[in-house]
Image (spheres, rainbow, N blue to C red):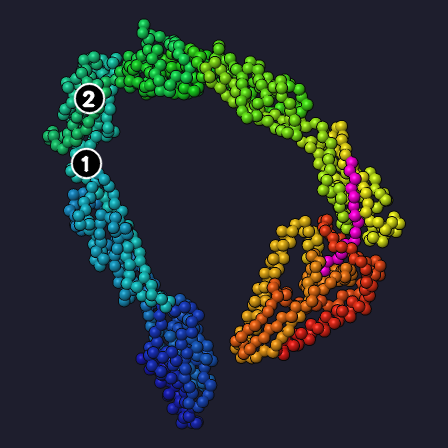
Amino acid sequence: MKNVKILHLPLIFLFVHACFAQADFAPYFYDNGPYSRNGNLAFFSLSEDTAVGTQIYCLNGTDPEGQEVRYGLSFDPGSKEFFRIDPKSGNITLIEKLDREKQDSIDVLVSITDGKSKVVERVTIFVMDANDEKPEFRNMPAFIDVVETTESGSSIYKVEAVDKDTGSGGSVTYYLQSQHFSLFTVDRHSGVVRIKSGEMLDYEKTKTHFITVIAKDGGGNFNGKEQFLSSSATLTVNVIDAQDTPPSFIGTPYFGYVYEISVPGSEIITVIAKDGDVGNPNPVRYSFVDGDDGVFSINKTSGCISLLTQPIFLKREIFNIQVKASEVSPAGRLMDYGVTIVVIRVVDLNNNPPTFYGVNGPQNVFELTMYEHPPEGEILRGLQIIVNDSDQGANAKFNLRLIGPGRMLRVVPQTVLNEAQVTILVEDSAAMDYEKHQFLTYKLLAVEIDTPERFSATADIVIHLLDTNDNAPKFSSDYYIARIPENSPGGSNVVSVTATDPDSGSWGDVKYSVYGSGADLFLIQPESGIIYTQPWASLDAEVRSKYNFYVKAEDTEGKYSLAEVFVTVLDLNDHPPSFNDNFLETTMVIGAPVKIEAVDDDAEVPNNVIQYAIMKAEPDNNIFEINADTGEIMLKSYIKSMAIIQNITKHRDCTWSLVVQARDRGQPSFSTTAVIKIDITEATQLKGGPLGPFLLQGRNKPLQILGMLAGIIALMVTLTVVISTAIFLRNKKSNRILPNRRVRRRPRRENTWTLKNPFKKPETSGAKFRVEEEEEREPGVVVENVNYNNNVSNIRRQWPPPPPPSAPSLPPPPPLCTPRERQWAVPTVSATVGPRPKKKPVITRQDTVNKALVSELKMRLEQKRMQNN
């Protein structure tokens, strides 16, 4: 009715106003339905988990006259304001947290005005549920008592929990934490807690059980996600005891002891038993079942066991007595019972230590005489030892140990009970050596094992060792080195050897002897070990300077050892040097040394080390020099040509005589002189780059030169065959008829060592030329090669074939020196030199350039001709 009044007041005012003035209509809201978020807020609902600050709705209306409208929002007095509105846009924003469980709807007054008229409407906003509440237990936690005899599967409690949420979020199911290891189970829907099927409670095992129950809702949306909430509470179950358990003994197992000094009536041990039903226990009565043999008694109420007779009359060492504890009801009737075993041992007191006995009674020293190095494992039968302990049982158990130098002996047995025959065995035969120990002293020790007193006893074992011939003589060194001059006379002392034998008496006497292939010139004194030369021996270091042989040291029973003797005959300087006759006449090429050689027959340095010197040279002393160590004779460095020698000596003859001395470095020093005739000549420069010096150096090695020439010839033949075959196949394929071709070969030159290397330019301008003697040339050989339609071949060839043509080298640079200062190639070793040229033609630079240009022109014409073909 209140809404009706508010809505009709503006209409009455408008009606009255319309009678006096022009009509003015009020603004109004759009009604867009219950699910719209734009309109008049009618039938609008909002989830309680909507976040504060969210824009939830937009008021929307209009004015019939088209005036601008403003929106308003208010709450009843005293109500909590949950929303705020923007008057101009009509946007409504949530400003307070919603909680459906506290308030499930909100009344709001919304208004619209055009400045003259205002319309107000009351609307209700419904708050929708979200799953934000946990289940709450109504009767938990709880404490209940359950008798231990309650049957399996019985219901013991009903858990109840509620959830304030609606729908699935308000449904509750129940679970047990660690259900697999629990004696209980819970119904998921009803919450009834039961004892699990097949399980029983036991007060004697567990008096209290703690059951954790979990209540979980069915889940629901919260903040756009599905959420499940749960709560837990504890149910405490106290187990009530029932009379269902027999008495049980406490402190088992039971062990008692009867000592040899015990008297009748002595208390041995007390057993204690309690009723298994500890919640409401009954008294216990004790009795024997079996095994007491009438020598023990037990107190019925206290359980104390006592001895009834003297220990000497006990027939057994160990008694196993069955004791029964019976439960007595309040009426005095025996009910359930339990049985245990009580072990009573008759114990001997440890009042006797171990004792060693010999043949005549107790003994502390045992002596034995024996030879050294007895066999390992042998029993020392001369020792008769018995050990005894008069106590009984564990008090008579002890260990035997042998204490002494090393581990030569071993005792058997090592553990003894009461009494045993002691046996001593040899453990290390080699250590029982008379030369190291003439007597051995050991301590035989017996120590109790398991007694607190640890009684012990000792006995001395003294073993006297007798010597045997167990050692061979041993030299002071494995080898001896001696030196003796080669001029020593026969019977001279060389070296003294020494060997010792540690055995005693005649076994320690040593005799010496020598033998071996090198011992023919030597003797040894059998007793002293002095080695000397045979009286007739003559030593010569040049004949033999090293001798080695063996010396033997032997005792009276034939045991021996060997040592090796090395004798060096010291060389004396007793031979002068002597020259090799092959070098007394030789030819020297200018720039190449000539080597002479002398030998000294002495065996060692410095006696056989030779130094050379030029004593005299004819016709001039000032052009030669010699290497004092190697014997190389060479011209002095400033002599480069024959012209220089002729200018110095003023002689045309180039044959020289040199008196050369060879002197050794021994003390005293010996020397020898020889006359060396040297014919000096100039070198004929060989063409061919590096091949020339190689051939010159190898002139004394003809086999090497022949092998190299054979390889070159084989290579040329192979190349010729390959080229010929290729030409033949090409002509046959094209079916060409070749014209007659005449090949004129140049005659070979007779100079053996003149070769040309086409792959290397000469190093100097003068290396391209050489001066040769005029020789007769052989007539050219004409080879006809006629090819008729590539089928018939009539060829006369010269074998071996000529080498393939090579491109001539480029013109050499102009010489750096005048023709008179010609540079000569100097070989590194001596070699045979060609004959001296008869005439030296004058070679100019222009001739050299012309020859090079002609060669290059020929090469280019030949290349052009081959390209045209």
Which label sits on residue 319? Answer: 2
Residue 623 placement, left or right of 229: right
Q: Amino acid at mark 1?
A: Asp
> Circle 2 sits in a helix, a strand or a loop, which is it?
strand
Residue 130 at x, y percent in the picture: 33, 67
Span highlighted in magenta in the image: 673-689
- Which residue extends farthest top? 360
> Circle 1 sits in a helix, a strand or a loop, which is it?
loop
User: Is residue 550 inside the magenta stretch?
Assistant: no
Q: In the picture shown, does residue 704 fall above or below 438?
A: below
Q: Residue at x 45, y 89 (%)?
A: 66
User: Is residue 686 inside the magenta stretch?
Assistant: yes
Quadrant (top left, top right, bottom left, bottom right) of the C terminus: bottom right
Quadrant (top left, top right, bottom left, bottom right) of the N terminus: bottom left
Label 1 neighbour load within 10 Å: few <14, some 14-19, many 20+:
some
Q: Residue at x 18, y 45 (%)?
A: 200
Residue 235 at x, y percent in the picture: 26, 49
Q: Residue at x 78, y 36 (%)?
A: 673
Q: Amino acid at mark 2?
A: Phe
Mark count: 2
Residue 731 at x, y percent in the picture: 55, 76
Which label sits on residue 277? Answer: 1
